[in-house]
Amino acid sequence: MSLHDLITPDSIISSLRARSRIQAFKEMAGVAAKLSGLPCQRIFEAVMEREELGATDVGGGIAIPHGKLAEARNIFAVFARFEKPVDFEARDGVPVDVVCLLIAPESSGADHLKALSRVARVLHDPLRMARLRSVSDAAALYLLLTQAAGARAA
């Protein structure tokens, strides 16, 4: 599974202007709803339910919030770069500037974990992150994400 399987050019937000973690999740849920046809509020609630179990920041200014929905037909993601980093109260204290929101069907089982793992591997590569942080165009972000994922697809 590669990021090419999870995102589309329309699922990239190149300059998210959210000022809080909650606002970011709401805006990203809105994009996810438009792409998937799922209700925005249900997506937001699924992500927040998971956040209550433990924050989904992974350090280094990166967060991978995720949730499962019975009505989701496939696993998909929305990628965003913040216009200005946001305090997510991350364990490492680094404000978050890159978020990949992942939604999966409740029945996805191991595929959900594989998708999370793929996103984490791509976003933990320092060279890729430097490139992702250096461009501001959504098309360039999409290309960097999908090329990086495709180059090492499992």
Image (cartoon, helix red, strand yellow):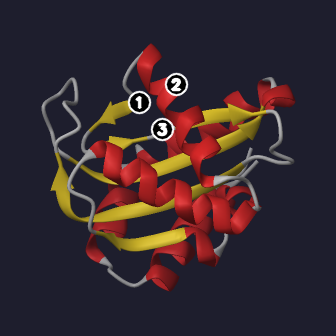
Residue toward you, 103 or 22: 22
Q: Marks 1 and 2: in contact by CB < 8 Å?
A: yes
Residue 45 location, quadrant: top right
- Answer with left or right where residue 139 lies relative to residue 74: left
- Which kind of residue does numbered mark 2 sit on? Arg
Residue on which the image places disc 3: 65
Q: Marks 3 and 2: in contact by CB < 8 Å?
A: yes
Residue on which the image places disc 1: 56
Q: Position of residue 83 (x, y in %)?
A: 23, 69
- Answer with left or right where residue 67 lies relative to residue 86: right
* In the rendered image, the vertical position of residue 62 relative to residue 3, given as above or below: above
Q: Can you say which quadrant of the picture contains the C terminus? A: top right
- Residue at the location (69% across, 32% down)? 68
Q: Marks 3 and 1: in contact by CB < 8 Å?
A: yes
* In the rendered image, the vertical position of residue 111 relative to residue 10, given as above or below: above
For numbered disc 2, what is the local secondary structure?
A: helix
For numbered disc 3, what is the local secondary structure?
A: loop
- Which kind of residue does numbered mark 1 sit on? Thr
Q: Position of residue 10 (x, y in %)?
A: 61, 76
Nearer the camera: disc 2 or disc 1: 2
Residue toward you, 11 or 144: 11
**N-term mark: 2 or 1:** 2
- Which kind of residue does numbered mark 3 sit on? Pro
Nearer the camera: disc 2 or disc 3: 2
Look at the image and tell me whether residue 111 can be seen: yes
Q: Position of residue 76 (x, y in %)?
A: 70, 52
Residue on which the image places disc 2: 50
Q: Position of residue 79 (x, y in %)?
A: 49, 60
